[in-house]
Image (cartoon, grey):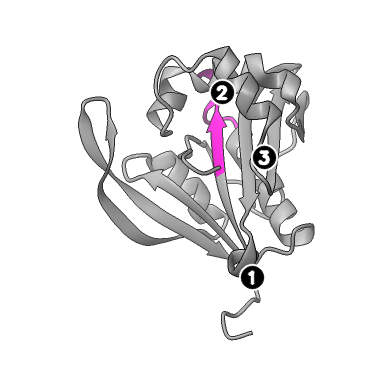
Amino acid sequence: MPNSFSNTAIGEPLAPDKPPSFAGLTIRAREPSDFEEIAALMNLPKVRWGTLRLPFTSKEQWRKMMENPPDGMTGIVAELDGRMVGNAGIIQFKGRRSHVGEIGISVHDDFCGRGIGSALLGALVDLSDNWLSLKRLELTVYVDNEPAIRLYQKFGFEVEGTRRGDVFRDGQYVDSYAMARLRPRWSTRQ
């Protein structure tokens, strides 16, 4: 999701080729009718800390965004026993970058470290590799979001660079990493 940094915290690493599965967890397509739950999720302090979102984004703003998603956007949510605990998406670029997608993930403050981020990222990687035939996934993450960085590395993402003083967050400028994952067994020479 452009302009959306990732805020995923994880516990014990899980195999990246097999997203976690546990009772009550559902990953499904995001629907426009989810706007109220997503607005509440995205306004949580830890979620907001890990993204470019400003405080106090209204439900109405989320409704409008979800009714008119960008071209190439696929949004998913994680529900645990019927409660929304995560939100993620991938945008496939157009033209000469149509082989590239940008992702964003957010996990509910109260559910970090329980495998929700791994489930969401596993679903996005599967979508990218097996349905969209993307060769490259990109994301941006704050350098101090160590749990998210570990998650991305577990799924094959590598730091490609540091954006110094990239974002003004909580009264100060912070750095971010540009991270990317090339599809396994794909060469830039093809």
Alpha carbon distance from label 2 to label 3: 12 Å
Q: Is residue 178 left or right of residue 114?
A: left
Residue 130 within the magenta-colored segment of the rendering: no
Q: Quadrant of the C terminus?
A: bottom right
Describe the element under mark 3 as helix, strand or loop.
Answer: helix
Q: Closer to the N terminus: mark 2 or mark 1?
A: 2
Marks 2 and 1 in Cβ contact (< 8 Å): no
Q: Quadrant of the N terminus?
A: top right
Mark 2 is surrounded, within 10 Å at the Cα level, by few (under 14), some (14 to 19) or many (20 or more) other residues, namely some
Q: Residue at x 63, y 60 (%)?
A: 94
Question: Which residues fall within the magenta stretch?
Answer: 104-114
Residue 106 within the magenta-colored segment of the rendering: yes
- Find residue 119 and name its label: 3
Q: Is residue 189 left or right of residue 160?
A: right
Location of residue 102 in the rendering, given as x and y in whole percent from the top left corner: 56, 51
Alpha carbon distance from label 3 to label 1: 19 Å
Q: Closer to the N terminus: mark 2 or mark 3?
A: 2
- Find residue 67 and name its label: none
* Amino acid type at image mark 2: Phe
Alpha carbon distance from label 2 to label 1: 30 Å
Picture quadrant where residue 120 is located: top right
Q: Is residue 137 above or below residue 67?
A: below
Q: Closer to the N terminus: mark 3 or mark 1?
A: 3
- Find residue 111 and name its label: 2
Q: Is residue 110 visible?
A: yes
Mark 3 is surrounded, within 10 Å at the Cα level, by few (under 14), some (14 to 19) or many (20 or more) other residues, namely many
* Amino acid type at image mark 3: Ala
* Amino acid type at image mark 1: Pro
Q: Residue at x 74, y 31 (%)?
A: 22
Location of residue 168 in the rendering, given as x and y in whole percent from the top left corner: 27, 34
Describe the element under mark 2 as helix, strand or loop.
Answer: helix
> Which residue is identified by label 1?
184
